[in-house]
Image (tube, helix red, strand yellow):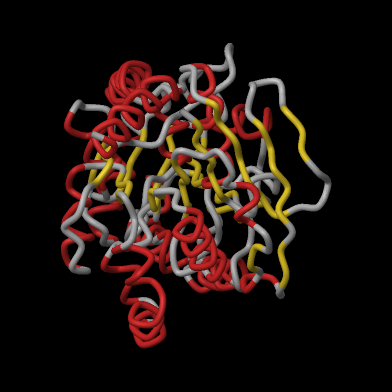
Amino acid sequence: MRIVTYHPRAQVGDGGITTSVRRLSSAWARAGVDAAIAYDGRDGRRRDADGVEWIAVPHHGHRRARRPWRLRRALAGADLVVVNSAWSPSNVVAGAAARRAGVPYVLAPRGAYDPLILARRRALKRVWWWLFERRLVRSAAGVHVFFEEQRSDLAALGHTGPVIVAPNGVEVPDGPRWDGGSGGYLVFLGRFDPEHKGLDLLLHAMARLPSERRPRLRLHGPDWRGGKDQVRALVRHLHLDDVTVADAVYGDDKWQTLVRSRGLVYPSRWEGFGNSLAEAAALGVPTLATPYPLARFLGRGGGCLVVDADPGALARGLEQLGRPEAAEIGRRAAEIVTTELSWDAVARRWLEGVERLRS
């Protein structure tokens, strides 16, 4: 079976979707699938060390409006196409190309149909839905969700067709594991989108704690539409000398930041998956998160401290995360990730779902 995954930014950065596309395709290749990734580029074809074929597809347009040109050529011989993300002009073109080529496609919105995401720029999304997205969804052979509970997001859009249920995978390097919190700080890793990531909730939670009980907190991530400056302003307004607003960390710097922390805090108002939480869990780092699907999944097995998305609940959670018994949360999290969220296990879940679509 040949699966072509289309993601324009598959060779750019180490963002969540980019990393997932690469890891899942490699896991499919290990399982015997003829796996390929079609991306925005002009440098021809190559085959990487993991046996995944990379297909450069010319794109035109500006930034977020870039669209593939001659994508149909990349789909030659494919049994299935996987189209990632949502609300994207490039996806609309990709879906149309797959339909013209007679190749079934699975749409992997990666949480982008969450009701809270739909509420953002609601009027624009409503127009886009009726003009473009509705056909993209309804013409798909199936839609991918991370967890069963996310079926309701699709049902709210009127989609009751086939669904593939498979979580994201997690892969961390051999060696580093939580060292008990030698750095003495709590950490957040993610982009500086204060509303989405709940950073305002987290900072107000910190302000509720007496200064003598307030943990040191480091916020690491890339800026998003001026969000980092908004966070800095709120830190100053709340007089939070214990909070550091810092650059994003990648590679070994990221792993070392996690393993030396006392715990990871992930206060999102909504989340498709949340790779930072999954990676921290894989390392055995104690975690605190708001009740989105991955956090609830880990929490049911004792692998995450899950609290409501409000400052009071987060303040209480911050205190709990600093206690010695929080180490057990990290230990349970590492067990859950190892057994259920490895990329090979996720690839098997995906392929089982694909076989059900084809039967």
Q: Quadrant of residue 251?
A: top right
x, y (%) of residue 55? 69, 43
x, y (%) of residue 235? 53, 66
Camera-nearest residue between 165 and 121: 165
Camera-nearest residue between 211 and 40: 40
Residue 155 higher or lower than 14, as above or below: below
Residue 63 higher or lower than 172, as above or below: below
x, y (%) of residue 128? 41, 80
Give the side of residue 319 with respect to residue 19, left or right: left
Camera-nearest residue between 294 and 86: 86
Residue in the image at 47% along x and 40% along y? 276
Residue in the image at 43% along x and 20% along y? 344
Residue in the image at 46% along x and 20% along y? 180
Residue 310 higher or lower than 284, as above or below: below
Look at the image and tell me in which quarter the C terminus lies: top left
Q: Tag count in the figure?
A: 0
x, y (%) of residue 346? 37, 27
Q: Quadrant of residue 299?
A: top left
Q: Quadrant of residue 65?
A: bottom right
Give the side of residue 302 with respect to residue 73, left or right: left
Q: Residue furthest right?
A: 43
Camera-nearest residue between 7 and 162: 162
Residue in the image at 51% along x and 74% along y? 237
